[in-house]
Image (cartoon, helix red, strand yellow):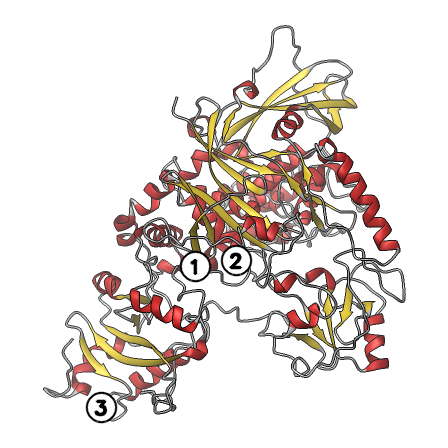
């Protein structure tokens, strides 16, 4: 653009724009690392334009739209050039940077080795529509306010950093003891499991001292696990400073604590320190273990094979933001489905043109942006010749990574959700459910792209004593396949392994190589169809509790069938444990014989009577039916939410509790523990339960509210929503003048969702086209990758790396995606 200033004074030029320029205040989010509509950054060719009024960032292609919509003319333009460091003697000194500093302390190139690159950053003011440019800094000619605003914008923190980090989520520092740690040759070898504190009986929260190999229990560290503090005691006696928590060791690292520095630390030499005690998990790059039992990590990521990278449209990686592979793997699969492509990428222009003033918080905009980035091929270009030569010369294996960083997307999807907003690994299945519910909530039309997964389950419940039945239908998106490990085809081998493992533990020997259970798919399918007992079944025929059984069938078959392998179960300690199983999933699947039949000739229907209402007001400790809790927990819902659901539906079984969960999933305290006390203050059950919990509020309270001029229906609603607390009911009315504004969250699912028109149906014959696999001991740790069949070949998506798959591990997946075969 034309430089200006020579023709007439910059100060005069700026006068008409001054009222539009704001100085960012605390709490303003300044977007200087990512365009709101694309994955352009200051490193992109056209740089990034940051609006000096809204502080939103725009790439070159999108800034005009913002100007047209808002009339906002003044932008801070940021451009970063990445240069390679000169390595010859002459170029020893780094080039002097123009603005005296690298001002973009932004989440850009963390992914490649920062030491080999220099950044040169340039900032200038740009005035639209003429694209006048004013180089910065320009203290002499610019009004002071403009300079102050630019400085404040350049120094603003990242909009994604949480303002209040948890004490241990803060940047963890490298321990000063790491480099010079002397390890004793005590001959200690640590087995991968079966540990115990050497001074007491504790078997969890165990810490391995990296100096002498002592295994001792922790104390109430920040993760809330118990212990007798023997690890700390040992440090006080010996002064050996570093310990690693045993159950956190994965190929990605582990939790290290420094007793001396009294905080969690980073140990850059952890791989060597662990290898000293025979723990080789971090050295996985050096050699593939020679045992015939290849680890899940190696099989799922197809390590040890030279995979060929693929580039172009539909082969774009998603960078890992740190434990975010659950999100990357799920979004890759969703955007390989034509309905999702059409809904978001097909409507890109319309979505962008009609996006609200803050597109960073608009679901449709961010979905369209991510989908377009994955499908356009712009972020997946093969390395050019010079880069390849340089790679060979330097001996680097990985070229500079391509792909997109879904930072803004993750911030939006995780907003208001205690788990998905954190930096911890999550259950991909729970994330899929969360995302589907957001897609449905944000669909303007009655149709939503998530309808492709939706099907109706026919549940047939039978009272064993009277023989009478009840048929009910409920919508679902996921078929959950149980894995009966007891039916493994290699059962003998498994039993033998258990014996050898116990012997090894008793004799303090390294454990035998693990054996993976092999369970045939047909056995899992059979287990799915078996009748199950309904705990605490209340029979309306007998008007009493009795034995009941339930079978599930498909009332409809979806266009795309999502099948979850129930690999995770809860151990006695409530930690989700993962079964090491192999289930050979078929490429073609015919479920026609699982179609529900409805009421059969000769079957008698259970009378339609409701059981007596149980209100959670009784101050006694809550009775919670644990088997229903487990049933829900296995679906991937947070444990505390499941306990609340069962409690608030009066232990009426998992089905009732499931509808409570669907209605309350989006609430911020969804995963908070159940707080039961005499007062209603702690946990007001919301309106959803009104139907089967609170009968009518006391008439005198209703009368008081109506006497103040509020309609009777609103009075009842307000009292029900606040547990009949008069004062809070009035507050409620003032914040919900039209009644339940959140009616979409709080009406019972049955009322808000006439499922009939929204369910597609067709033959139950399917072909496998994608699956997500998980590596690691539990959904809350480890790593996810996905394999997708595109253009007739399987492709593996492992964070930013996209390669042709040579041996897709179809037997080790966690979530499988099938598409209906054309009939």
Mark earlier in primary sequence (2, 3): 3
What residue do we see at 78% from left, 35% from top?
492
Mark earlier in primary sequence (2, 1): 2
Name the spot of residue 503 as percent of width and height, x first.
Answer: 86, 50
In the rendered image of this protein, does residue 475 appear above or below residue 430?
above
Name the spot of residue 351 as percent of width and height, x first.
Answer: 30, 50
Circle 1 residue = 406
| Residue 395 is at least partly visible in this image | yes
For the residues labelled 1 and 3, the Cα–Cα distance comes to 39 Å
Contact between marks 2 and 3 (CB within 8 A): the answer is: no
Of 685 and 100, which appears nearest the observer? 100
Of 97 and 804, which appears nearest the observer? 804
Name the spot of residue 656 as percent of width and height, x first.
Answer: 65, 33
Q: Which mark is residue 491?
A: none
Q: Which mark is residue 141?
A: 3
Residue 480 falls left or right of residue 579? left
Contact between marks 2 and 1 (CB within 8 A): the answer is: yes
Mark earlier in primary sequence (1, 3): 3
């Amino acid at each position: 653009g034309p430089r200006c200033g020579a023709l007439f004074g910059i100060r005069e030029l700026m006068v008409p724009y001054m009222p539009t320029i704001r100085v960012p205040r605390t709490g303003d989010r300044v977007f200087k690392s990512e365009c709101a509509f694309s994955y352009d950054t200051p490193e992109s060719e056209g740089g990034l334009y940051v609006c000096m009024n809204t502080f939103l960032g725009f790439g070159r292609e999108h800034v005009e739209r913002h100007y047209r919509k808002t009339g906002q003319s003044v932008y801070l333009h940021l451009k970063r050039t990445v240069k390679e460091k000169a390595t010859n003697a002459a170029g020893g000194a780094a080039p002097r940077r123009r603005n005296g500093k690298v001002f973009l302390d932004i989440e850009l190139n963390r992914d490649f080795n920062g030491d080999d690159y220099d950044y040169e950053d340039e900032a200038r003011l740009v005035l639209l529509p003429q694209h006048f440019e004013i180089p910065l800094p320009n203290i002499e000619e610019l009004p002071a306010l403009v300079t102050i605003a630019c400085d404040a914008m350049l120094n603003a923190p990242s909009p994604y950093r949480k303002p209040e980090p948890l004490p241990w989520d803060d940047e963890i520092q490298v321990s000063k003891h790491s480099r010079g740690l002397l390890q004793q040759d005590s001959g200690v070898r640590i087995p991968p499991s079966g540990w115990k504190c050497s001074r007491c009986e504790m078997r969890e929260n165990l810490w391995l001292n990296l100096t002498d190999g002592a295994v001792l229990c922790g104390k109430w560290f920040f993760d809330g696990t118990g212990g007798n503090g023997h690890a700390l005691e040992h440090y006080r006696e010996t002064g050996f400073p570093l310990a690693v928590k045993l159950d956190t060791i994965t190929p990605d690292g582990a939790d290290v604590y420094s007793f001396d520095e009294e905080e969690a630390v980073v140990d850059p030499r952890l791989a060597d320190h662990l290898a000293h005690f025979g723990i080789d998990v971090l050295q996985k790059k050096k050699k593939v273990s020679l045992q015939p039992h290849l680890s899940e990590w190696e099989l799922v990521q197809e390590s040890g094979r030279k995979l060929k990278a693929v580039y172009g449209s539909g082969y774009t990686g998603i960078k890992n933001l740190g434990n975010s592979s659950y999100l990357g793997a799920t979004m890759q699969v969703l955007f390989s489905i034509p309905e999702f492509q059409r809904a978001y990428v097909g409507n890109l222009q319309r979505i962008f043109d009609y996006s609200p003033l803050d597109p960073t918080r608009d679901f449709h905009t961010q979905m369209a942006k991510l989908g377009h980035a994955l499908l356009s091929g712009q972020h997946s270009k093969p390395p050019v010749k010079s880069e390849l030569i340089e790679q060979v010369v330097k001996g680097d294996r990985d070229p500079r990574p391509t792909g997109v960083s879904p930072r803004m997307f993750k911030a939006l999807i995780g907003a208001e959700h205690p788990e998905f907003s954190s930096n911890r690994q999550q259950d991909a299945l729970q994330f899929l459910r969360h995302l589907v519910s957001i897609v449905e909530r944000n669909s303007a039309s009655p149709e939503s792209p998530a309808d492709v997964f939706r099907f109706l389950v026919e549940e047939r419940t039978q009272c064993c004593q009277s023989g009478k039945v009840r048929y009910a239908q409920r919508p679902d998106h996921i078929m959950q396949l149980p894995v009966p490990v007891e039916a493994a085809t290699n059962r003998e081998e498994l039993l033998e392994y258990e014996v050898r493992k116990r012997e090894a533990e008793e004799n303090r020997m390294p454990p035998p190589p693990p054996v993976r259970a092999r369970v045939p798919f047909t056995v899992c399918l059979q287990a799915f169809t078996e009748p199950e007992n309904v705990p605490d079944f209340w029979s309306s025929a007998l008007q009493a509790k009795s034995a009941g059984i339930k079978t599930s069938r498909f009332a409809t078959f979806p266009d795309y069938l999502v099948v979850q392998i129930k690999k995770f179960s809860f151990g006695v300690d409530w930690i989700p444990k993962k079964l090491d199983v192999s289930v050979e999933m078929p490429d073609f699947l015919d479920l026609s014989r699982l179609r529900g039949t409805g009421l059969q000739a000769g079957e008698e229907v259970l009378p339609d009577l409701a059981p007596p209402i149980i209100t959670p007001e009784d101050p006694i400790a809550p009775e919670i039916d644990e088997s229903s809790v487990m049933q829900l927990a296995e679906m991937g819902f947070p444990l505390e939410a499941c306990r609340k659901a069962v409690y608030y539906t009066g232990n009426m079984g998992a089905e009732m509790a499931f509808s409570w969960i669907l209605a309350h999933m989006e609430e911020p305290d969804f995963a908070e523990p159940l707080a039961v006390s005499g007062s209603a203050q702690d946990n007001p059950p919301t309106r959803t339960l009104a139907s089967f919990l609170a009968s009518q509020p006391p008439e005198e309270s209703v009368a008081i509210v109506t006497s103040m001029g509020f309609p009777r229906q609103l009075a009842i609603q307000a009292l029900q929503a606040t547990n009949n607390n008069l004062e809070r009911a009035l507050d409620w009315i003032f914040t919900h003048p039209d009644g339940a504004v959140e009616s979409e969250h709080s009406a019972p699912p049955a009322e808000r969702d006439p499922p009939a028109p929204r369910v597609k149906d067709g033959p139950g014959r399917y072909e496998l086209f994608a699956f997500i696999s998980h590596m690691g001991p539990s959904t809350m740790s480890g790593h996810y990758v996905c394999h997708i069949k595109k253009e007739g070949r399987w492709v593996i998506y492992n964070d930013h790396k996209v390669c042709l798959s040579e041996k897709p591990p179809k037997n080790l997946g966690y979530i499988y995606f099938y598409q209906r075969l054309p009939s």
